[in-house]
Amino acid sequence: MTLLELIYRARLRLDDYGGDTGTVPEAFPYSYYWEYDDNGCLWKNAELVEYVNSARNELARRIPIHDSTTEELTEITLIIDEPNYSIDPRILAIDSVVLASTGTPLIKLSDAENRSRWRDPYDITFSEPTSVAHYRADFNDFILTVYATPDETDVLNLAVRRLPLETLLWEDRYLDITEPVAQYHEALLEWVSMQAYLKRDADTFNAELAGRHQGLFTDAVGPRIQFTHAAVLKEIAGARLRTRACY
């Protein structure tokens, strides 16, 4: 489905065609009059595009996109004597980090472990690994830190969960929407409708309908993840979970 088709279906649900009685110019292959002139519409094309992008991001936060092939996000070039590297803000969590030269997975260090895999907290002297073997991901500052500090160049290959790569633009409305996959396009329409009915205008605001469409979106894709829960999921992503017997 293209962005234009999605917005057309949204306008069908919202019953918002702006009259659609004008003559579409022949100089450009417009499909609808509101595509050419949305002045008579309650919701402008730019607003609906914004709602679609909001829907795609919200969906990805509930059902993240798994990716290990998009190089700009999933490849990090290690630099000699540099332990810190930027994480793309579109990345929601890192599932694994592999050293390309050896194919060896790096071990994730969580804040809770505090590098205790090789450090004695009661001893001020400790030895870090002599080659890159561990990493820590900080999603507050979007920084990935490797241990030990690299002494030669290499590449890290990441498997991540992320937001959509591109923000949809009205100018690209004839292109197919590839993220998310087609099975979730119906859910996008529910979120778009919810956002539309929350517009603060006497002719558009309807809290009851907004709540209904938000509920239908949740029924389709699952509940919103709370901030604290999301933080825990990021912390344990890629970590080897261990259980301990206790009384």
Image (spheres, rainbow, N blue to C red):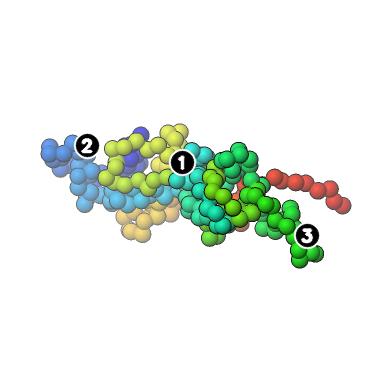
Q: Which residue is mark 2?
A: 31
Mark 1 secondary-structure assignment = loop
Q: Which residue is mark 1?
A: 70
User: Which residue occupies 51% across, 40% down?
Assistant: 67
Task: Say what amino acid the circle numbered 1 marks.
Answer: Thr
Q: Position of residue 50 (x, y in %)?
A: 36, 51
Using the numbered discs, state the Cα–Cα distance from disc 2 to disc 3 in whole angstroms. Answer: 69 Å
Q: Position of residue 6 (x, y in %)?
A: 34, 39
Structural crowding at the residue carrying mark 3, measured as other residues with C-alpha within 10 Å and reported as few (<14), some (14–19) or many (≥20): few
User: Which residue occupies 67% across, 58% down?
Assistant: 111
Task: Say what amino acid the circle numbered 3 marks.
Answer: Asp
Position of 211 with respect to 47 (left or right) is: right
Structural crowding at the residue carrying mark 1, measured as other residues with C-alpha within 10 Å and reported as few (<14), some (14–19) or many (≥20): few
Of labels 3 and 1, the one closer to you: 3
Which of the marked residues, 3 or 1, is nearer the chain's N terminus? 1
Q: Which residue is mark 3?
A: 120
- Residue closest to the eye, 219 or 161: 161
Quadrant assignment, res 26: top left
Q: Is residue 86 above or below residue 69?
A: below
Mark 3 secondary-structure assignment = loop
